Image (spheres, rainbow, N blue to C red):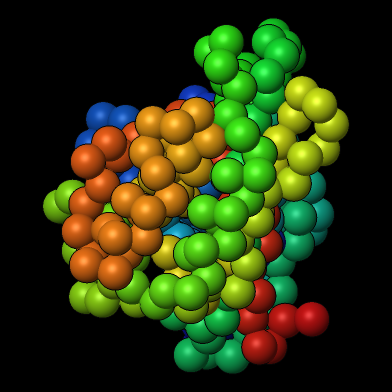
Amino acid sequence: MNKMRYFAELAYNGFNYSGWQKQPHKPSMQETIEKAFSTILGAEIEIIGCGRTDAGVHASQYFMHFDFDGNFPKSFLSRVNKFLPKDIVIFRIFEVAPEAHARFDAVSRSYIYQLSFIKNPFEIQTTYFYPYALQPDFGKMQEVAQLLLNYQEFYPFCKSHHDAKTLQCELTRSEWLQIDENRLEYHITSNRFLRGMVRLIVGMCLNVGIGKITLEEVKSALDQQTLLNKSWSAPPEGLFLRAIKYPFIK
């Protein structure tokens, strides 16, 4: 029997993991899910994810693909969710074309970063508490976020030791939303993202908001494709991969 290719839609809280990708002696979503699928299906299952989220980063929507040549046991979705830890859930599994690829076929990805100025012990895993007395200027943060839409290359917002072949990204959204007087959200959408890009952008916006760096310095770094003098990667807990689009998925 020929192997069939399947996509799975899922979500996870990344607080307890070293990231999506398997790493020696560290817990990862990839290894945890492969173990669950392999155990219940009685076959060695290897999965490919739509991206590699960092340690502590979450996903409210994520897609992966895998190949399998057998029949799914009765109530497989329910069984695999019971096997998985509480911080990972599989929403659905569906057959796709044999050449479909969770990572390379995605046409856009959207992230959201959640930030609060009020400490909340029930949100410590999913929202960044901004603990400083000086609150950032929302208008300046919005202005510099919009500035990014004018560029296609983002060397200032890529972590060192990356393996990216190109630093080009096609941003279609970059904006801050003021949810209420104590809560902000940053929304960004692109065809692809560089390693650590979103957290570096959030950190930059906050630094502009408190006057630590200027809009002109950011513009100069983007024009010249150089690093900012004061780069800061915002903490991972506020970041969610929230939407992935494919041409063959409604």
The quadrant holding residue 189 is bottom right
Horizontal side of 228 relative to 248 (left or right) equals left
At 65% from the left edge and 44% from the top edge, which residue is drawn? Answer: 139
Horizontal side of 250 relative to 88 (left or right) equals right
Q: Percent position (x, y) of residue 126?
A: 64, 29
At 76% from the left edge and 55% from the top edge, which residue is drawn? Answer: 91
At 38% from the left edge and 31% from the top edge, which residue is drawn? Answer: 212
Q: Is 193 above or below relative to 113? A: below
Q: Percent position (x, y) of residue 250?
A: 79, 81
Q: Percent position (x, y) of residue 86?
A: 68, 30
The quadrant holding residue 152 is bottom left
At 77% from the left edge and 40% from the top edge, which residue is drawn? Answer: 178
Horizontal side of 48 relative to 1 (left or right) equals left
Q: Nearer the viewer, residue 143 or 190?
A: 143
Horizontal side of 58 relative to 75 (left or right) equals left
Q: Percent position (x, y) of residue 198?
A: 46, 50
